Image (cartoon, rainbow, N blue to C red):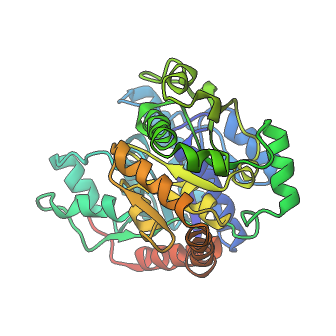
Amino acid sequence: MNLALLTSVAGNGGSASTAFHLTRLLCRAGHRAVLFAPGEYWPERGRAEGVPVQPGLELRRGFHAASFFRDYRTLKQYVNENAVDAILVQKSPEQWLAAAVRARAHKRPALIRLRGVVFEIKPTATNRWLHNSMPLVVCSASAIARQFQVLPEFRTDTVKVLLEGIDTQRFKPASAEEKRAARQHFGLQPTALYFGTAGRPSPVKGHDLLVRAFGRLCTEHSKMVERFDVRLAIFSDESRRGPGSYADLRDLSLACGAPDRVDLCPGFVEDMRDVYRALDSYVLPSRGSEGSSRAGLEASASGLPLIASSVGVLPDLVRDGETGLLVPPNDEAALAHALKRILDDESFAQRLGTNARRRMENELREDLYVARLAELLTAACTSKPKA
């Protein structure tokens, strides 16, 4: 297939990273895929990593007539000259541009929406018209797909759930030497038992909830915590601060009742494999969002027992009591209890990690994901176009 992917995010960010990585995977699978991205970051990274990225589109938020028509001419020319089979989009600026190009292209490409966010879908007439004209909407979580079921007059037969995949060769259980080296790299205690999490310092990620739950664990089960030398590590990229971000996690850790057992690791992590290698269990205490979860996939493939809030895609990734533990969102007591369950039974924790790794290998490998996506795209491209 000949595919064009669009992102309106100029810098390194979730949806743009997903589009860039998907372009790479589709090319590896033998398809002709090109990512259109504004700015210089993605074209430069594409050149460095051998991923086809086209500059030239502005994809500004809101309607800016001159900018939109420049983008329209550029994309339409590419679509016509290359007989594009499908245009894959993730956000509103991308889908409206693609819809305009599709309407006037010589060969009408299929317009495919990749929806990986759990934000409310506005049931406006224009959104309904555009949605119903698409032959395929690929949702990264069951919770996202369910949103369409309650929208009046929105097609549901074109909405499919496809969980993202993971490279199980790149992400795998750590050897003893890899664990030792990772802990040394971050300055963590070499023999402690570590719970941990990573993410931007935003309340939606629930770092504060995890710190309080860990403090409760230390207070209520102090002898167990001391016996196993239990610690909490939080890897937080301070460069991704935005409106509403925590002022300072250190203040919260000082107030949790066990500040000497909380290790804060600020800064950008170059290779997330080092984080998973350093930990014994991974925690995703998110209050919301998580339309997709690279961390959940990566931690599971790394053989770590995963404790996660039941939001977004996390109930799809975690089979409660089998590959990890699910807790209600924003429930400090339930999260503390889940931490204790991991400490109570070492064999149970190991079994969760082993089962999680096995599921990633058998069901959620990247090659399986790309093959399933290709099947959906092929069917969409050969379906009868809608108006």
For this orientation, the residue located farthest to the left is 152
**Residue 112 in sight:** no
Residue 310: x, y in percent? 36, 56
**Residue 201 in sight:** yes
Q: In this view, does 88 lie above or below 69?
A: below
Quadrant including the C terminus:
bottom left
Q: Name which residue lies at 63% across and 44% down.
A: 226
Quadrant including the N terminus:
bottom right
Q: In this view, does 98 lie above or below 256?
A: below
48 relative to 299 in the view: left or right: right
27 relative to 128 in the view: left or right: right
Residue 64 picture quarter:
top left
Residue 196: x, y in percent? 60, 46
Q: Name which residue lies at 83% across and 64% down.
A: 175
Residue 139: x, y in percent? 39, 62
Count up the numbered dots: 0
Q: Name which residue lies at 63% across and 59% down.
A: 298
Residue 218: x, y in percent? 52, 40
332 relative to 348 in the view: left or right: left
